[in-house]
Amino acid sequence: MSEAKIIDGKAIASDLTDKLAERTKDFVAKSGAAPCLAVVLVGDDPASAVYVRNKGKTAEKVGFTSIQKTLPADTPEDELVSIIETLNTDPSVNGILVQLPLPGHIDEAKIIDLIAPEKDVDGFHPINVGRLGAGNFDRALIPCTPAGSIILAKSALGDNLSGQNAVIIGRSNIVGKPVAQLLLAENCTVTIAHSRTKDLEDVVRGADIVVAAVGRPEMVKGGWIKPGATIIDVGINRVDAPEKGEGKTKLVGDVDFSEASKIAGAITPVPGGVGPMTIALLMQNTLTAAERQWGQSQG
Ligand code: GUN
């Protein structure tokens, strides 16, 4: 079996952000203001802090204004509520992202419900979830990691995914469920597998497209994969890497890359696969949100 094509998410994300930077220039020329993304981080989880910093940096690179609000882990829920209400009503803010997970004393669903749907660049608000489910893409904001995963699958398979058997491992609101809706909209036959699925290996063996989003390092083995399948690995797991020296760590996906890349037709690496696409799609959602809000303001 020949080696799989490695899907270069970093390069595809970089092409996309270049195009968004051009579209942003057009938007600024007609509206007179740069799109503005507000990112709210509660607490000091180091991985979340890195993501949030990268989001801010990329936003500025494509020509957006970026606001970052970092709040202590013990911030009362009321205070977060009032910050979001202020961002909702501020006409200069086009996109709002609250980094998840939130500390345990804050009701995550309540906070997501509060974000104005037209500024919900994560696509997590029930209105956007419903629009995605109903196929109302013109008005929805689509979750970033799922949207990025579809672009990567298409980069390997072409734009027509119709009739492909897609198996998603993981049923989260952030990835598993929305990626299932997107693949269904692409006319795939979709299976959502999860921790209680019987005979998971056999289910995965039937897949032309595998989306792995469980958060378990290298759980999906090469022997589970149908020869030639396309593998989209959403997992980002930090594990010990004693081979790099004492106390060192590395990032791995949910798929055993060294095994799977000998059997799959195409596979995303970790890092450098889905991760960069998530940030690029966040920029796309922010620009789309700004364009729609400006259009509305013009009557
Ligand atoms: N935490 C992990 N992934 C995400 C994401 O896509 N958006 C937000 N807001 N938080 C996350």
Image: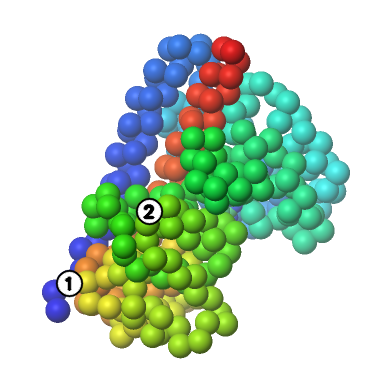
Residue that badge 1 annotates: 3
- Which quarter shows the N terminus? bottom left
Find residue 277 and report its horizontal and vertical position in percent.
Answer: 40, 49
Residue that badge 2 annotates: 186
Q: CA distance from mark 2 to mark 1?
A: 27 Å
Label 1 sits on what residue type?
Glu
> How many C-alpha atoms fall within 10 Å of the one at disc 1: few (<14), some, or many (≥20)?
some
Question: Which quadrant of the figure has residue 275?
Answer: bottom left
- Residue at image point 25% right, 65% down: 266
- Residue at image point 17% right, 72% down: 3
Q: How is the image coloured?
A: rainbow
* Depicted 81 relative to depicted 190: above or below: above
* Depicted 93 relative to depicted 297: above or below: below
Q: Secondary structure at mark 1?
A: loop
For this view, does 299 lie left or right of residue 256?
Answer: right
- Residue at image point 54% right, 35% down: 139
